Image: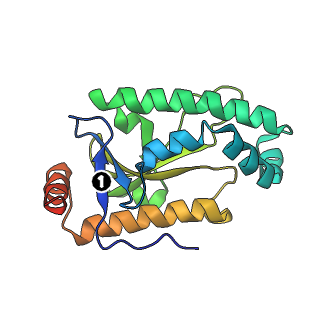
Amino acid sequence: MHYKSFVVMEFVRVIKGYDHLWAVKEPDKELDELTSLFERWNDADYLFQFFKNNIEDLKSYFKIEKISQAIHDTFEDSDALEELILTFPYTEELDTLFRPLDVTDMKSMEMTRQKARNWERERHDSWLRIYAIRLEPNVYVVTGGAIKLTRAMQDKEHTMIELDKLNRCKDYLIRNGVFDKDSFIDLNMEEQK
């Protein structure tokens, strides 16, 4: 399953009045990608079904046997990550939260695919991921996110969808002449006319 292609992509500021953090918003959806992520990660029914469907990965990679523990850990981690990402746009700290997705994204720092998580999580590593395109230092466009229970994004369909969304957003921005925050804002203004 592939993420649908967009003729036009819509972007919204995560925090009104600040140009550090943006999120993709599909025209047919009520919520932008970042808001939607945190809603899912705080929905016990969604999490129960997700962990039930991925229990073997949960057991083998994280050594967690109980879905109730996974849900509790996700609630806790989601709250911490939401606080981190919504506090940082006011500072120049987003670059400490986001890191290159893989080695191909380490060669250049602009227009690269990035991932964020709670890097300081105790007990076990965070399985929550927020994916974004880095436009320039401390300026990001969130394309989505996932609960990542396996080593590679290519291992599961739901993370492959997120990888596809990242790639499509990056391609869209490059095709439309975006290379930094100013060119991104110009595109966004143009799209809203």
Q: The residue under label 1 is which amino acid type? A: Phe
The quarter of the rendered structure image containing the N terminus is bottom right
Depth order, front residue of 193/164: 193
**Residue at image location 39% in from the left, 30% down from the top:** 86
Where residue 184 sits, quadrant-wise, is: bottom left
Q: Which residue is mark 1?
A: 11
Measured as percent of width and height from the top left, residue 147 is found at: 62, 48
Q: Is residue 52 left or right of residue 144?
A: right
**Residue at image location 49% in from the left, 69% down from the top:** 3
The quarter of the rendered structure image containing the C terminus is bottom left
Measured as percent of width and height from the top left, residue 11 is found at: 29, 53
Depth order, front residue of 30/21: 30
Label 1 element class: strand
Depth order, front residue of 174/51: 51
**Residue at image location 69% in from the left, 54% down from the top:** 150
Looking at the image, residue 41 lies above or below residue 87: below
Q: Is residue 131 left or right of residue 110?
A: right
Looking at the image, residue 97 lies above or below residue 10: above
Measured as percent of width and height from the top left, residue 166 is found at: 43, 61
Where residue 189 sits, quadrant-wise, is: bottom left
Measured as percent of width and height from the top left, residue 38 is found at: 52, 39
Residue 91: tell me if it is visible. no
